[in-house]
Image (cartoon, rainbow, N blue to C red):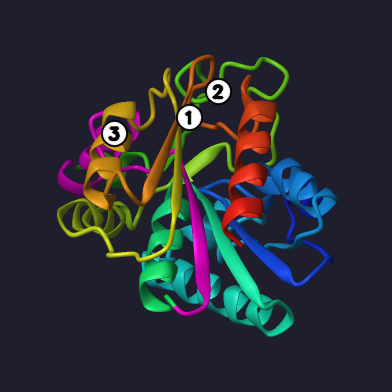
Amino acid sequence: MNEQAAGPFFFPGGDRGALLLHGFSGTAFEMRALGERLSREGFTVSVPLLPGHGTDPRDLLERTPDDFLAAAERAHRALSERCRATAVVGFSLGAFLALELAAGAPERVRALAVLSPPYHLSGSLGILLWLYSFTPIRRVLPMFPKFASDGEIRDLTWRGRAPGYGRLPLKKARELRDYFLRMRRDPPRVACPVLLAHGVHDGVVPVSGARELARRLGPGRCRELYLPRSAHLIPLDLDRHLLEDRVAEFLAQVL
């Protein structure tokens, strides 16, 4: 893997900051184009690389959601020291980390953009996590081959080409599954405005979960954006420019 392409990235700007968090087994590259767009709008943008990512899949074997959250908290503290107001934008796993950051530091996180949250585990991700949590497959096939598909991304330009792991190290699958289920049972209570975006054709985590999460966050607090041509990896998919426009407009309004 090209570690330079994987990130992390930092784009200095004004006194409004945006922390962008990538997904499980991906890299900061997933969020780079969105980060560059926000940078052009005058935001200071931090796109960290979560622990165990961007190197070798074996580096992810012992990592847990607590490790990812701790890294996100460190990156947010550093950004907060530079900026008077901050927002957090999270994709997939990063969406849940963003919610936890906002709930834990309401005085510092002024807005959230939640992209493709893994709220319902009835898609391919949920099936895979169940298999690795409760069947012997984890002993037979400790690294599951990752196949790019229409359910992940529909733009052929980036399908299977973005930096990330081609194999999923799922030794900690049960911990990851338990984390997602806990977030579904009791999603963090946030006080700031939220933009929730999801691809209509997502086969990894279904769009029905995003609709339910939006209801639980509250219609007065949560704005919804459903991308008609996109699957799971919406920061790189066919509606990415629409997503970038809406995120930039939202953060400009609320920060």
- Classify 10 Å Cα crowding around label 2: few (below 14), some (14-19), many (20 and above): many
- Classify 10 Å Cα crowding around label 3: few (below 14), some (14-19), many (20 and above): some
For the image, the number of numbered tags is 3
Percent from the top left, x then y, of residue 253?
Answer: 61, 52
Residue located 30% across and 42% down the image: 214
Residue located 66% across and 56% down the image: 55
Mark number displayed over residue 100: none
| Lower sequence index among marks 3 and 2 | 2
State which mark lies toward you, 3 or 2. Answer: 3
Which is nearer the eye, 181 or 187?
A: 187
Mark number displayed over residue 153: 2
SS class of the residue under badge 3?
helix
Which image quadrant for residue 233? top right
Which image quadrant for residue 192? bottom left
Percent from the top left, x then y, of residue 198?
Answer: 44, 32
Asked whether the residues under the numbered discs 3 and 1 touch, taking CB atoms below 8 Å apart as contact, a structural biologist would say no
